[in-house]
């Protein structure tokens, strides 16, 4: 099966990613023991004790094995600052980030698919030019700018949506959605532009294919050609890029969560970074990188279901 | 479908009648005259072969007839009448009741003319649903029948497969099945065998022929290889630079070729009885640019018979025998033609300045 | 692994597609598509030149910030705070009454320094690695590309945050780190371009005729790879400017009170209600700059692109 064939490379990537996370956080300057103790308590003896306690004096490979072994059992250690277990902090905050991220992707796709298709269908017309230049312009708008203007319009002027804060889904689903809407929209705008442009290009290519001509001479309606014949073959790079763009969304969530004061993983990372909370940074970075790799792996698998040429083992035109 | 029409008119009305069809493209380089005044006619149950080199406008002609070309930056004049109905003015919406149901088409490359992500079965039943209202089991059974009729073994199993699981020949059979699904009256096959290997080519052509006879369908076979249509077409039209340069019933064309270009095409068919070392006489030179062709016969620069007149006056189709027309000032096999060739041979070059070496000239003269 | 395409220093994937000209075959439209007969001149068009002019203006501001006749960007003037454009200074003042125009001009310096340095580092190092691996192929390529794909498996901003936290944040450090992090993507672009160039007739010819590798690299490959990579660099510069803005926004960019565009937007957010122009003006400056870089980079890229396919 395709999934099984791809599994070894997934595992290899996960290993490499964990190694990189570890090295990056371990080799950088600054003594974690000093961080933990604070300047005034940092007597040489205390530092030595903490270092021994954390295993910081072991050789790097040993430290990595310890760390990854613990991480695999879900133990990322405790925050220096709050003493909260890192894994609990992450589990607490992951749903928030996941919700706004997924919502953003859904919004972006819901807009981009029809708009990109329209643009391709009407390629070269005024409609198409308007769509193309708008999406080109949106690519130049950073997400924090989008967020600020959304807040200005919907929270300050219209007062219909909250500017900050988060309500859990389990507490109040409606309020939850209201609190997630602006952050998700802020993340969605740039994605929308990316998806639209990509789909437009691919769709224009597909519409010139022979099989579309064949469908036309069968008497199939334009609408059906667009949705049933052309959309799926045009959506392969869209899927791949949507997977890759999850990286941009995760990065964006750091900014957006900070701006909207949401208790998500992005803000957790930022806070940990600001106070150099080593174990927290390590844990969050690992979880983020692993999620990203897994998402792209999943996209890869989904892709093979969308494109029968891959799942049937024929050579696929992918690099 | 069509509004009331006197029944008696229908019998002798041609199935397809194309009259002075022109199709130009407005491109950055200028106006490409891909089809420039083509007239032809196809009757029920008859086969018309359209033959021409690459770039002579065959595909554009077929798409123009089928009303498939995009509307923007395409200039289209003349008329295409299908059973008396004018197609050129029809909107896509009206065309859709004709496409698939009454006119069908097969494209050159079976590798690209099937949707790669849709099962074969769904691709066949789609038009059954649209035109015949067949669904579910009925449509599926019909699809199996169709696949069997085009000679695909294990038809039931094939329904669930994807195009990439089939060989090129099998795929072309599938596209034929799709084209024939709703019993069209006219089938346009644009180089149906060019992408296939030789043994498969024959099978596909035979298949088209039997299907045509069974269904009393009009058939247009487009090809760059005269050999493909030699034994199969009732009539052959030779196309050059967007125009028909010679048209005749098949036997007549082979027996009394008039146009030097046709003569060249004939020579490029490999013959089995020829000794294997016989050099294939391909036509020297390349087809002309379709942008701004200028005066004179477009074939003149490559023609052994070319005279001064050919460079200034564009020849029009003129009748030579019953149903035989050719556009040439100095037709092959006439005294005018013989004289022209003799003159050029003596001069060692044609009026267009093409050198005429005696070996090609002798080969040509021998055929004439 | 499915080698996620780049995220740091990489332009949005959507920005890469050329402006496809086509007739969407099935569109039954009669709206004439911009008279294709005339439009296809190989000129650059008005927008391109407007974008170029804007970029030159920004560059001049950055280089000559101290010489330009603007007020001091750091002097507060509380009486005139949140002034509208025209009331006090050409573009008004911020929440502390500092002159917006002056801060914009000085902020340009930060944006330009960081983006130029980062892009230069990325282009030189990444370009070198890419050309080497694309030209010599073999093991070097395999190893290099594996490492690069792993680095690219991290969301860029996450990597950047982690590095910044532990290394510090002066203008130099930020430029260096962003530059370092953008090496992988340039390696990819340069490699893809090199592969395409190396396949071309004249390169194959000179290689089979026994030209020395170094000579082929210098005479054939380099000149043909530099332009596409540089055009890519322009678009990537826009990404770096946004990145700097993001850092400023997170309080991780150059230390206050030195003005940066991102910082101005961040500060102005507080006065969103009373004085939206304080946010609006630096936002427009940043938007126009990034847009111009995208426009110019895209135009040059379509012209120089030698790659048949994507990365
Ligand atoms: N949409 C178009 N816009 C501009 N020019 C076109 C277009 N379609 C076809 N042409 C031009 O029209 C001419 C005829 O093309 P056509 O495809 O009909 O040739 P053909 O006889 O089918 O050749 P082949 O044997 O290669 O299929 C060519 O010169 C081609 O470049
Ligand atoms: Mg053709």
Image (cartoon, rainbow, N blue to C red):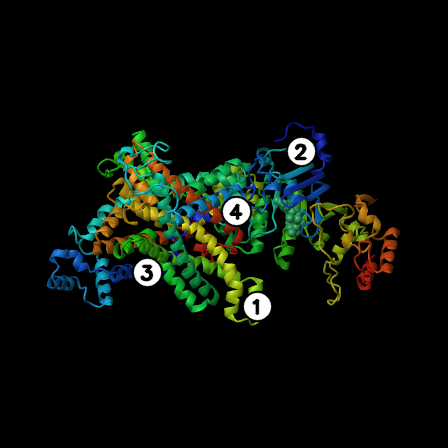
Query: Are the residues flagged by discs 4 and 1 from a single subunit?
Result: no
Query: Are the residues flagged by discs 3 and 4 from a single subunit?
Result: yes
Q: Quadrant of the N terminus of chain B?
A: top right
Percent x, y for residue A191? 39, 44
> Label 4's element?
helix
Residue linked to disc 4: A205
10 Å crowding of disc 1: few (<14), some (14-19), many (20+):
some
Which one is in front, A34 or B162?
Answer: A34
Marks 4 and 1, how far apart at CA: 36 Å
Assess whether mark 1 and mark 2 are in contact (beta carbons under 8 angstroms): no
| Residue occupying the point 32% across, 48% down | A251
Marks 2 and 1, how far apart at CA: 60 Å
Mark drawn on residue C206: 1
Question: Of callouts 3 and 4, which one flags the residue occurring earlier in the amino acid sequence?
Answer: 3
Which one is in front, C132 or B40?
Answer: C132
Query: Are the residues flagged by discs 2 and 1 from a single subunit?
Result: no
Residue linked to disc 3: A11
Q: Nearer the viewer, mark 3 or mark 4?
A: 4
Tell whether C32 sits left or right of C13. Answer: right
């Amino acid at each position: 099966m395709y999934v099984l064939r791809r599994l070894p490379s997934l595992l290899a990537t996960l290993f490499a990613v964990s190694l990189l996370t570890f090295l990056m956080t371990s080799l950088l300057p600054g003594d974690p023991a000093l961080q933990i103790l604070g300047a005034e308590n940092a007597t040489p003896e205390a530092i030595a004790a903490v270092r021994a306690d954390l295993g910081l004096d072991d050789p790097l490979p040993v430290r990595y094995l310890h760390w990854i072994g613990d991480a695999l059992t879900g133990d990322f250690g405790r925050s220096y600052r709050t003493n909260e277990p890192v894994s609990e902090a992450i589990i607490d905050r992951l749903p928030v980030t996941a919700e706004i991220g997924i919502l953003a992707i859904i919004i972006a796709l819901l807009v981009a698919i029809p708009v990109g298709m329209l643009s391709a269908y009407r390629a070269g017309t005024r409609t198409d030019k308007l769509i193309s230049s708008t999406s080109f312009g949106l690519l130049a708008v950073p997400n924090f700018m989008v967020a600020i203007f959304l807040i200005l319009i919907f929270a300050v002027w219209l007062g219909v949506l909250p500017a900050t804060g988060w309500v859990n889904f389990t507490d109040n689903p409606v309020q939850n959605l209201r609190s997630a809407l602006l952050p998700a929209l802020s993340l969605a705008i740039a994605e929308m532009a990316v998806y639209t442009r990509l789909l437009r290009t691919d769709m224009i290519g597909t519409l010139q294919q022979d099989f579309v001509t064949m469908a036309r001479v069968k008497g199939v309606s334009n609408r059906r050609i667009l949705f049933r014949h052309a959309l799926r073959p045009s959506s392969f790079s869209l899927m791949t890029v949507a997977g890759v763009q999850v990286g941009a969304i995760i990065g964006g969530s750091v900014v957006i969560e900070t701006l909207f004061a949401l208790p998500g993983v992005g803000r957790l990372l930022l806070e940990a970074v600001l106070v150099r909370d080593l174990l927290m940074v390590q844990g969050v970075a690992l979880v983020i990188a692993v999620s990203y790799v897994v998402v792209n792996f999943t996209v890869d698998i989904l892709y093979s279901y969308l494109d029968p040429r891959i799942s049937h083992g024929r050579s696929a035109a992918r690099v | 479908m069509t509004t009331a029409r006197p029944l008696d008119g229908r019998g002798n009305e041609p199935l397809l009648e194309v009259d002075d069809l022109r199709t130009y493209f407005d491109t950055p380089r200028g106006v490409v005259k891909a089809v420039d005044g083509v007239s032809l006619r196809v009757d029920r149950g008859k086969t018309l072969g359209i033959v021409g080199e690459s770039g002579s406008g065959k595909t554009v002609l077929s798409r123009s007839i089928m009303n498939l070309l995009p509307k923007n930056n395409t200039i289209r004049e003349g008329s295409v009448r299908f059973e008396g109905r004018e197609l050129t003015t029809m909107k896509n919406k009206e065309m859709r009741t004709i496409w698939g149901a009454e006119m069908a088409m097969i494209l050159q490359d079976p590798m690209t003319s099937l949707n790669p992500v849709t099962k074969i079965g769904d691709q066949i039943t789609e038009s059954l649903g649209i035109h015949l209202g067949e669904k579910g089991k009925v449509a599926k059974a019909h699809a199996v029948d169709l696949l069997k009729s085009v000679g695909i073994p294990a038809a039931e199993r094939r329904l669930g497969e994807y195009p990439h699981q089939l060989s090129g020949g099998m795929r072309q059979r599938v596209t034929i099945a799709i084209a024939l699904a709703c019993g069209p009256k006219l089938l346009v096959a644009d180089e149906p065998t060019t992408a296939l290997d030789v043994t498969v080519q024959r099978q596909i052509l035979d298949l088209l022929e039997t299907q045509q006879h069974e269904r009393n369908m009009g058939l247009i076979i487009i090809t760059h290889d005269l050999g493909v249509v030699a034994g199969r077409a009732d009539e052959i039209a030779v196309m050059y630079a967007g125009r028909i340069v010679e048209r005749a019933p098949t036997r007549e064309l082979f027996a009394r070729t008039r146009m030097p270009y046709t003569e060249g095409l004939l020579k490029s068919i490999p013959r089995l009885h020829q000794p294997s070392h016989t050099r294939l006489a391909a036509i020297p030179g390349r087809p002309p640019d379709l942008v701004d062709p200028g005066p004179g016969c477009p074939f003149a620069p490559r023609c052994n018979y070319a005279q001064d007149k050919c460079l200034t006056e564009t020849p029009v189709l003129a009748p030579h025998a019953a149903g035989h027309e050719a556009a040439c000032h100095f037709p092959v096999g006439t005294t005018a033609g013989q004289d022209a060739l003799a003159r050029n041979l003596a001069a060692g070059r044609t009026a267009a300045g093409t050198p005429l070496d005696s070996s090609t000239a002798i080969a040509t003269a021998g055929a004439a | 692994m499915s080698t996620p395409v780049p995220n740091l220093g990489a332009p949005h994937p959507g920005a890469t597609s050329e402006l496809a000209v086509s007739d969407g075959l099935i569109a039954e439209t009669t709206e004439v598509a911009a008279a294709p007969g005339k439009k296809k001149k190989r000129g650059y068009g008005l927008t391109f030149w407007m974008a170029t002019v804007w970029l030159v203006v920004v560059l001049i501001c950055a280089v000559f910030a101290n010489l330009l006749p603007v007020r001091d960007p750091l002097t507060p003037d509380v009486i005139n705070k949140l002034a509208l454009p025209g009331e006090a200074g050409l573009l008004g003042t911020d929440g502390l009454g500092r002159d917006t125009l002056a801060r914009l001009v000085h902020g340009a310096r930060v944006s330009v320094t960081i983006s130029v340095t980062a892009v230069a580092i990325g282009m030189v190092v990444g370009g070198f690695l890419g050309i080497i691996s694309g030209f010599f192929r073999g093991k070097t390529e395999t190893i290099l590309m594996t490492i690069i794909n792993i680095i690219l498996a991290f969301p860029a901003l996450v990597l950047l945050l982690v590095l910044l936290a532990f290394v510090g944040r002066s203008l130099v450090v930020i430029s260096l780190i962003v530059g370092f992090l953008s090496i992988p993507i340039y390696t990819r672009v340069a490699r893809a371009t090199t592969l395409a160039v190396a396949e071309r007739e004249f390169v194959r010819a000179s290689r089979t005729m026994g030209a020395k590798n170094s000579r082929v690299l210098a005479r054939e490959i380099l000149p043909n790879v530099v332009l596409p990579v540089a055009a890519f660099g322009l678009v990537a510069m826009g990404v770096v400017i946004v990145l700097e803005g993001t850092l400023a926004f997170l309080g991780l960019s150059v230390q206050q009170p030195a003005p940066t565009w991102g910082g101005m937007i961040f500060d102005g957010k507080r006065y969103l209600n009373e004085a939206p122009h304080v946010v609006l003006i630096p936002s427009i400056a940043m938007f126009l700059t990034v847009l111009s870089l995208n426009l110019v980079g895209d135009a040059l890229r379509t012209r120089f692109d030698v790659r048949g396919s994507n990365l």
